[in-house]
Image (cartoon, rainbow, N blue to C red):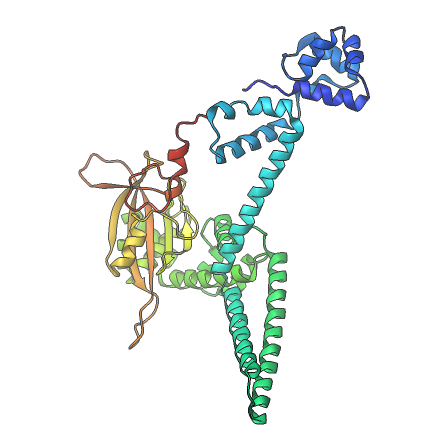
Amino acid sequence: MPRDTLTGSRIRERRVMAGLKQSELAKRADISPSYLNLIEHNRRRIGGKLLVDIAHALGVEPALLTEGAETTLLATLREAASAADMQEAEFVRVEEFAGRFPGWAALLAETQNKVETLQRSVEALTDRLTHDPHLAASLHEMLSTVTAIRSAASILAEPGDIEPEWQRRFNRNIYEDSARLADTSRSLAQYLEEADSEASETNAPQDELDGVFQKSGFHLPALEIASARVEDVADELGQGLSHAARWLLLRVLARYRTDAERMPLAGCADVVAASGSDPFALSARFGTDLASAMRRLAHLPEEILPDPVGLAICDGSGVTTFRKPLPEFPLPRLGAGCAFWPLYRALARPMMVHVEVMEQSARAAARHRAYAISQPTGPARPGEDVLFESHMLIVPEPKRDGSEKVREVGLTCRICPHPSCEARREPSIMVASAPRKL
């Protein structure tokens, strides 16, 4: 435990609050004013009888001079110094800085907390703007309407005479577009107010969806019943969620219900007992596609599947739309995972099954077998592009002495320790901060 260098600062603060001069307190504690000055500037350690005498002179308990809220303060200052990549010689003097200048240290810590809060808010708003379909559609409609109004107004503002009939048409278009813009603005403002009252300020809709499944353990007994209604389950689970998160939840629950109807729990239990977490065996048993079998395995309860499996689903853009992480194989948010994951490589070769043993660089003790496939999200139509969705099932893999190739992968580039990786998108903070010992 690091030594406490802030006791002197607390003594000085209590002395000032009590209205005592330094010489007066020194006299009461039976020490010289110069020695008390060294103590108050945290240049002399203090304890035992002297601490008790000073506390008695100040009329406080000794614990109030040796304990305080500085633990959080020091932790915040260390985080700020780490983020700024401060030199080691300065970094180790954080306690001395907090002891000598407690006011400035508190101000710096408060500023650091505000910066972190603002960063989280910006990230949440960016995620929301990117992934909230209602918000994106409303903004698009507003921009389109403003462009139409500007076009009509620019024609009316051009020099020259315009026939009265055309003037009436342009004026009517501007009036109708203005009314539509006002309605859209009011609707958007109301939507944002409702969303703010329903959801956390720092949560994106996808985060809210993840929280629902984390709380339920990814298994929903209500949807295993034949008479269950998806809307009823969505209403129960969606309490307190934003409008966008409920929209996402309803889609996932509808797919869950379809998978449960096609692959009942009793049959799944028989397959798992015989073949373990094998999506091929489950797919063959019920005649379903491989992606459906992966989803079903990820939602099985512990009594059927004792060792949990992970699942990641992304759309054709690589954005994660569903994720079930494992303790030894976490999954990042919003599709920022390792480019070497089969999840993304499957998008380049649709309908081909990728099976690979992976070992995350930051968690070398754990290996996982990944099954990945990219499948169409709907039927093929003449003259239209097919949209694909990629699934990756993650199954814990015991270490074996075989010759099977193991691919080293990362979690995200920001915390991957391999600086020479060809797929790197940004520098790693782990490599930059490796020499420092916190």
- Vertical side of 60 occupied by 241: above or below: below
- Vertical side of 264 occupied by 169: above or below: below
Left or right: where 305 falls relative to 129: left
Residue 186: name its quadrant: bottom right
Left or right: where 426 falls relative to 86: left
**Measuring 40% from the left and 64% from the top, which residue is drawn there?**
258
**Measuring 43% from the left and 27% from the top, which residue is drawn there?**
436
Front one among 366 and 115: 115
x, y percentage for residue 416?
Answer: 36, 39
Residue furthest left in the image:
403
Q: Is any atom of residue 340 visible in this view?
A: yes
Screen quadrant of the N terminus: top right
- Vertical side of 257 occupied by 184: above or below: below
x, y percentage for residue 268?
Answer: 34, 54
x, y percentage for residue 173?
Answer: 57, 84
Q: Is any atom of residue 205 visible in this view?
A: no
Number of numbered discs? 0
- Vertical side of 162 occupied by 33: above or below: above
Residue 170: name its quadrant: bottom right
Front one among 226 and 326: 326
x, y percentage for residue 387?
Answer: 33, 66
